[in-house]
Each structure stands twice: as structure tokens, then as C-alpha cells.
Image: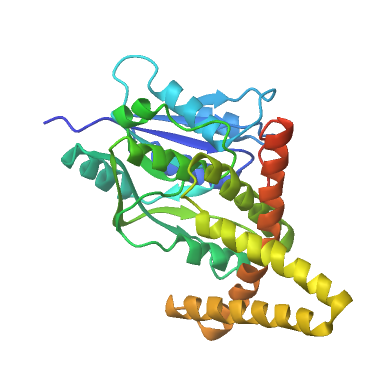
Amino acid sequence: MTPPSLGAVAIGRNEGERLKACLQSLIPQCDRVVYVDSGSSDESVAYARSIGALVVELDSSVPFTAARARNAGFARLVDGDDPPEFIQFVDGDCRVEADWLRVGAAALAEDPSLGLVTGWRSEIHPEATIYNAMFQVDWQRPAGPIDVCGGDMMVRRRAFREIGGFDPTVIAAEDDEFCLRLGDAGWKLMRLPVTMTWHDAAMKSFGPWWRRTVRNGHGFAQVGDLHPSHFRRERLRVWIYGLLLPVLFLTGLWIGWWLSALVVLLYGLSWLRTAQGLRRQGLSSAMALHQAVFLTISKIPNLFGMMTYYRRRLTGRDMHIIEYK
């Protein structure tokens, strides 16, 4: 029996050596690979062409989004005769584990009801910075049936076409939004207990973390508008810890110190609960307490992102991507 054909779509912008590692992990194992570039100023496009990848350069007059890039890559990949039956989507800052493509394709081939499979993503250098370490914790997800996953995924071509691909207007959590529609259409989604990709965050300072967290908040609001039950708890936490408690703290400076002290106590309790949860995931006490600080204050940049979305929606402005690299 002829194995199903497999294609890949990698997306990126100025990823440098990370993109080289990404494409090198795909080219030998895929029937066809497309690289979609969102306005790189480095040699990404030239390198991709030099090793045999098909290249799509997005028009910069239209706002860049990861969703738009993935759609463009899919369109180029299936253009022509014998389009791949399965498509691996991957971000350009990730290297694909050697055995993943075979395992993922076998799972899709075995179960026709599966629309998507994904695996485990790991951080290449989690020890380098606190920010990389937080990524590593965030990537840890249990295997089995899932509702949503990140942008590294292997998708059945028919399922992708059935739901119309990614929503190009969604600038963050577009992968969640895609998965939710896929599930609503009756397709099953599965995370296999296999390492899939190695991510290179290379995040070294507070500024990029803050901007990424602002972008996450934009995703909570935008995808929450499209799918009200999704990110409901996240939005509630942002309203409480990002808006209500700061307002109460400032009010306490005017009407009485006890109110401000109560707010500080509530933040402290949230920090301790978060740290306890991280300890249960296997982190050391010191690392858990450190990461809990960032997770506790993350609701403030999340709020900025949510308010950015609501302002854009009310004024009818384009949903421009919030860059953090």
C-alpha cells in the first residue's frame, strides 16, 4: 500500500539559524515543503529556495498574521496535481523531531475520523533564561484527545478545506480558533505521546515577554468573541487581577490603607497558589516561586491586549499583529 503523501508549511520572519534547522528537519522527509515569509530582511527567502523549498512571500500591504501565512502556505502546497494528503504546519523557530512525521502520518492514516494530530513541544534551552523556562512549562500538555493545540500540528487536507482553513483576521490564538472549528465540524483532535518539535524561544529580556503577554490578551478577547466559552476563565482572571484589584489598590490609597493592604494580600495568595501548582508540575521551589511572579503580574499586560482588541473592534481598525521578537 502506498503511504499517504506528506507536505509541510513553515512560516517565519527573520528566524535566521532557527529557520535553517526547521527546514533541514523537513526537506528530507516530506514530499513537498513550503516556506511562507512575512517580510524578512535577512536571507531566509534565499536560503529556503537554495535547499529546495517552495517560497511564498506575503504582500506587506496586507497585515501579517500567522493564520494568513499558514493559509497561503497551504494554498501553494496543494496547488497542482497530487496534493499532499497530510500537512505538517510548523513555526520557523522550531525544529521537527526526526521520527515525528512518520508517527503523525501513521496516526492520521489509521483513523479517518482524525482531523488533526499534534505531539509534544519542548524548549531547546530552558535553562538559559527565566522566560525560556516558562515556555518549557507552558509546552507541557497531557497526551490524548484534545480540544485545541498550538500552531505545530499535522492536519488532514480534507479537514482543512472543509472548515476553510485559519481565520486570517485572528492575530493571536489563531491555532485555538482553528481547532475549535475543526472540532465543531465533527473531526477528532489528538495529542500523541511523542516529541514533535523543539522550540527556540531565545527570549532574554522582560520587554519581549511583556509584548508576547499583551498579544496573548488580545487572543483571549478576540477568540473569546468568536467562541464565547473559550478562554472564559482567562478573561475573568484578567478582569479581576488586571483591572479590578489595581483599581481597588489605588482607591485604597485615597480612602484607607487597609483596602490597599487587602489587595496586596490577595495578590500574595494568588502568587503562592500559582507557585504550588508549578511545584506539582515538578519545578523546584525556587523556580516555581520565580515563575509565579511573572504569571501573577501577567494579567496586567493581558489586560492591555484585551483592551487593544476591544478598541480595534469598536473603531473598525485592522487587527495588526503584535510583534514581540
| Furthest-left residue in this view | 1
| Furthest-front residue in this view | 255
Q: Residue at x 58, y 84 (%)?
A: 286
- The reply to whether residue 78 is in sight is yes
Q: Decide if residue 269 is on the left or right side of residue 55.
A: right
Is residue 24 shown above or below 299?
above
Q: Decide if residue 162 is on the left or right side of residue 89.
A: left
Total numbered labels? 0
Q: Decide if residue 11 is on the left or right side of residue 184.
A: right
* Residue 159 coordinates in the image, percent (x, y): 32, 31
Q: Quadrant of residue 87?
A: top left
Q: Residue at x 44, y 38 (%)?
A: 178
- Residue 38 or residue 138, whichever sits in front: 138
Q: Report the quarter where the N terminus lies.
A: top left
Q: Residue at x 67, y 59 (%)?
A: 209
Q: Quadrant of residue 281?
A: bottom left
* Residue 50 coordinates in the image, percent (x, y): 52, 29
Is residue 323 shown above or below 79?
below
Q: Residue at x 60, y 47 (%)?
A: 221
**Coloring basis for residues:** rainbow
* Residue 292 coordinates in the image, percent (x, y): 59, 74
- The reply to whether residue 205 is in sight is no
| Furthest-right residue in this view | 254
- Residue 234 or residue 322, whichever sits in front: 234
Q: Quadrant of residue 12?
A: top right
- Residue 55 or residue 221, whichever sits in front: 221
Is residue 314 shown above or below 255?
above
